[in-house]
Image: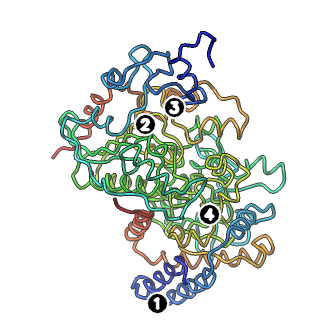
Amino acid sequence: MSSGQGRVDVEIENKRPDEAPSGKGHPNTCPGCGSHYREDELTTSLRVCPQCGHHFPVRARERIEQLADAGSFAEEDADLRSADPLGFFDLRPYTERLAEAEMATGLGDAIVCGQAAIDGEACRLAVMDFAFMGGSMGSVVGEKFSRACESASAAGVPLVSVTASGGARMQEGILALMQLPKTICAIEELHEGGGALISVLTHPTTGGVLASYASLGDVVLAEPGALMSFAGPRVVAQTTREKLPDDFGLAESNYRFGHLDAIVQRGELRATLSRLLRLFRKAP
Amino acid sequence: MPSEAEIRLRERLSKLGGMKLLRGTKLSGEVERLQDQLARLREEPSAEEIWRSVELARHQDRPYTLDYVSRVLDDFFELHGDRGRADDPALVTGLGLLAGRTVVLVGHQKGRDLKERTKRNFGMAYPEGYRKAMRAMALADRHGFPLVTMVDTPGAYPGVAAEQHGQGGAIARSQAAMARLSVPTVACVIGEGGSGGAVAIAVADRVLMQENAIYSVISPEGCAAILWRDAGEARKAAAAFKPDAAHCLELGVIDAVVAEPEGGAHADPDEAARLLKEAIVAALEQVEVLDPAKRRAQRRAKYRLMGTLASA
């Protein structure tokens, strides 16, 4: 209960549980500076805080709209869905989690792939969505990324990958781990056919996705402030009891240590990709 | 009712029977081995049996890479250092003779006593370890030596310096290096096959796994901490994600299970090494006869097919 003055609507509001407990604010409130935005304001600003430059997460379809020329995107392999090879059941069955994720996101799994053009340059896009089970990589993500490599290779165009992932999907057990070598083998074939991979790491790209295709781009870019670490900060702190540096695993620290070619502001990403696609264009 | 594992193994058996690739002397051996595995697989491992594998895979007396090296290879010469920054003792590399041929060996190495455990970092490699492995792989390719790897790690080391030195990228590049090799490659999971740190050196033409080894996407404790929110539920987690050899074979992740002596490899390391050597040599002989380009294509095709899919 709030104070005794008791305006009814306030009391009702106070009885509701917090929308997102444990310190996380409203999704449209900037964690950097506390500014709050309407949904249309954030969409217009590419989900970058106009006050402090914080990069909010971007869902896969919105990312594709931000990057691809209007009307150029043609989705491929949209019908692929995860099977449940282990009959996995933790506190809830995996099949239930999958169904719920599909309902919540409108996506079949944590990646959307297809043909696109960026400023007139043809390419293939493979864009992950963190909202689908933490962007975890199971058989479907591995398969769709591998098919995107093959599709890019067949069309003779570069593949642009945008990652956002907590890592391999535990519910698919060892088969999730096997998506690391699977996607890597697909990149090897792409490279041998003369194809290029441009990898864009967004917050967060960790675990098995960082330890496979996200790291193997001919050019590797990241958005400002993106966490890109093999082990998450919590795991590192718990396992080693080390004091973590403030910029642990962030794009800025990775750039300093030589793991990134550039950190690109979201507003510059489309122009940067189009420049790179032009540079990778092979003479006929 | 035959289990799904049995059906799949039967399918593989009948396919193998019709395979021209393995025609000749080696075929009968392979069929026999698969039949053995079929007999073992009749009953799917229970939750208790899976947990027993977890315990045996981590047993303090279980033979480690160098215990096998001294029994399996003749004249082993260890190669140190990544030629950039450091020598990572959690991962050993070297040249040795295996049944008369020179091979390059790469393997995780755990320590036996407290001092060595600390030195070897419990078999958890830094990026420098994987860069040393890549250097050894390049050497193998340059000279046409087959590559044999031994996998035994709880996982790649999750530390600040490891991240700063590029752990994720090193694991990715080590797998890419293995996907590119022209020489025959055999990987053996001999203890804990822990996640990215394990698969970093396990992308091979033939992947073998000892009967009581485990191979998994995350540790049982890690999985339990995340999905059950309680690391104490590790047994339940292990039963759910099934890291045992029989399930890995069923899922097509490994190519063969290597028997261990009664009671586990630690009960009789000499016999465990003899069985392992026999399996490695047999696996090498299967792939040595293939044309290098074809062998590499088959290796990639094998991984390309891993996973299970449904459609909307």
Give the residue at x 41% y 84%. Answer: B19
Q: Amino acid at mark 2?
A: Leu
Distance from disc 2 to disc 1, alpha carbons, whole Å, reads 50 Å
Marker disc for residue B24? 1
- Tags 1 and 4 in contact by the CB under 8 Å rule? no
Of the pair B179 and A203, the residue shown nearer to us: A203
Q: Amino acid at mark 1?
A: Gly
Marker disc for residue B194? none
The residue identified by callout 3 is A254
Q: Tell me the quarter of the image containing the N terminus of chain B.
A: bottom right
Secondary element under disc 1, as helix, strand or loop, is loop
Secondary element under disc 3, as helix, strand or loop, is helix
Q: Between tags 4 and 2, which lies in front?
A: 4
Q: Amino acid at mark 4?
A: Pro
Marker disc for residue A201? 2
- Tags 4 and 2 in contact by the CB under 8 Å rule? no
The lab-note entry on whether marks 2 and 3 share a chain reads yes
Q: Residue B83: percent from the left, percent from the top?
A: 58, 44
The residue identified by callout 4 is B243
Secondary element under disc 2, as helix, strand or loop, is strand
Q: Between tags 2 and 1, which lies in front?
A: 2
Location of residue A218 with respect to B71 vertically, above or below = above
Q: Between tags 1 and 4, which lies in front?
A: 4
- Tags 2 and 1 in contact by the CB under 8 Å rule? no
Give the residue at x 70% y 47%. Answer: B230
